[in-house]
Structure formats: structure tokens, C-alpha cells
């Protein structure tokens, strides 16, 4: 069941990234990039992996152009530091932005990122009493504030720069709505026990391009 919940969130985050990208960019969004000659054996996915960008960006930038060996394809490059580093160490690099801890009153982590009960835990759990303040970890825009994703209860998702999203699940009350701009440290919800939850806590995730990152890498030890 939890695997289904995580898959739903993966699809949701990827769809949000796609919508935000298309709504904020026109053809001019692909000015930062370069042309590459397609080789035998190349695919959209292999190019995406080579240049560390989502494959749909390449597809969108080359609408109407046939993908075959010998043709030239335009590969848009992600601007800023995200485009120059790999997935494994992005959390350590972006941590220089000084993120706020999402539950200021509680520093304890009851469940860490990674393997848990034979499954992958895509975030961290912070136990706290119902009604404890929950804040945005950085400046951003609320892209989801509802309870429509099975298992997460009252859920808030905030988009930040560099394609990052912060995810706050199981809230008791939510104080923002979709489209709201929020500041780092701003109250966004109260800790709760909604959805699939074994007790009052915040389930917190950081995602980049839809992929979960270890949230602990974004905060000072």
C-alpha cells in the first residue's frame, strides 16, 4: 500500500514539474543548450542521462524533428548549479542555501530516509504533538494544499528554485492554498495524524525533478 502512495506522489511531482516548466517557458526557454549529433544506439533516455535533464525537455525542444542516427538534436541545458552537478551530491551543494528546519520545536527524527521495513522511505518523519507549528523550509510557491493523495492525509507541496519541491504530509490543519507565495520559516500547517499514519508526526520530503533526495543533507548537523 505504501508503495502505491509513493508512486502516486512521484507521478504528482513529475506532473507539477512539467506544468510549471511549460507554463513559465516558451520556445525561448531553450536558448541555453547545444546541438548534438544523434549516434547509433542513442535514445531520448540515454541523452537525458548523459546531460542530466528530464527526457521530456529534449522531446519538447525538438517537436516535429525525427529522432534517428545522423540527425542533429537540440539539448536544452539546465541553468545554474543544478545543471553542473550530479544527483548524488546535489543535497550537499544546495544546503548552502540554509534551509529552515520544518518543525522548529522538535529536532528529533523518528524514521530516517532510506530503507525501512524492507521498503524505501522517501523522506524523514518528525514526531510532534498535534498542533505543533510546521513551517516552509525556504521561499517558494504552494503548488498543492489538499488531501487528495491517498495515504498522505492533509498534504502541502511547495515549489522552490532549482526545481526543488518540499513535501509536508499528515498535517492536522493547512494554512495555505495553491498559488500562495511563502517565505522561509512561514507557518504553513500544524502537525497532525491524518492519512495513513501511526501517530502524530510530519512526513517530510525533498524532491528534485520528481526524485526523492535525503532531506537531512539540506540542514546543518
Image (cartoon, rainbow, N blue to C red):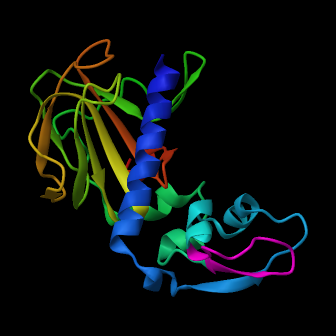
Q: What stretch is highlighted in magenta?
A: 61-75
Is 200 covered by the magenta stretch? no
Along the viewing direction, whichever of 113 and 163 lies nearer the viewer: 163
Where residue 105 appears, x then y in whole percent? 16, 35
Is 73 covered by the magenta stretch? yes
Q: Is 184 on the left or on the right of 125, as rendered?
A: left
Visible in this render: residue 54? Answer: no
Where residue 140 appears, x then y in whole percent? 24, 60
Along the viewing direction, whichever of 150 and 189 lies nearer the viewer: 150
Along the viewing direction, whichever of 165 and 13 lies nearer the viewer: 13
Q: In this view, which residue lies farthest toward the right?
A: 40
In this rendering, is residue 139 above or below 109? Answer: below
x 42%, y 57%: residue: 17
Where residue 36 appears, x then y in whole percent? 75, 82
**Displayed quadrant of residue 144:** top left
**Displayed quadrant of residue 205:** top left
Number of residue marks: 0
x 62%, y 76%: residue: 62
Q: Is 75 on the left or on the right of 47, as rendered?
A: left
In this rendering, is residue 129 above or below 31? Answer: above
- Judged by its main secondary structure, the magenta piece is loop
Along the viewing direction, whichever of 138 and 47 lies nearer the viewer: 47
Where residue 52 appears, x then y in whole percent? 63, 65
Visible in this render: residue 34? Answer: yes
x 42%, y 25%: residue: 111
Amino acid at each position: 500500500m505504501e508503495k502505491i502512495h509513493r508512486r502516486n506522489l512521484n507521478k504528482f511531482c513529475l506532473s507539477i514539474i512539467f506544468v510549471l516548466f511549460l507554463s513559465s517557458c516558451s520556445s525561448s526557454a531553450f536558448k541555453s543548450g547545444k546541438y548534438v549529433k544523434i549516434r547509433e544506439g542513442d535514445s531520448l533516455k540515454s541523452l537525458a542521462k548523459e546531460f542530466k535533464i528530464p527526457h521530456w525537455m529534449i522531446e519538447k525542444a525538438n517537436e516535429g524533428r525525427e529522432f534517428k542516427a545522423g540527425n542533429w538534436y537540440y539539448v536544452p541545458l539546465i541553468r545554474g548549479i543544478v545543471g553542473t552537478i550530479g544527483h548524488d551530491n546535489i543535497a550537499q551543494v544546495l544546503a548552502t542555501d540554509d534551509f529552515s528546519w520544518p518543525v522548529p520545536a522538535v529536532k528529533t527524527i523518528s524514521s530516517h530516509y532510506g530503507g525501512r521495513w524492507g521498503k524505501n522511505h522517501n523522506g524523514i518523519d518528525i514526531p510532534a504533538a498535534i498542533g505543533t507549528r510546521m513551517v516552509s523550509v525556504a521561499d517558494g510557491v504552494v503548488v498543492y494544499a489538499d488531501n487528495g493523495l491517498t495515504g498522505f492525509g492533509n498534504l502541502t507541496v511547495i515549489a522552490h528554485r532549482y526545481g526543488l519541491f518540499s513535501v509536508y504530509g499528515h498535517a492536522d490543519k493547512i494554512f495555505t492554498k495553491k498559488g500562495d507565495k511563502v517565505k522561509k520559516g512561514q507557518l504553513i500547517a500544524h502537525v497532525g495524524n491524518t492519512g495513513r499514519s501511526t501517530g502524530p508526526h510530519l512526513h517530510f520530503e525533498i524532491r528534485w525533478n520528481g526524485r526523492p533526495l535525503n532531506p537531512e543533507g539540506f540542514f546543518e548537523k
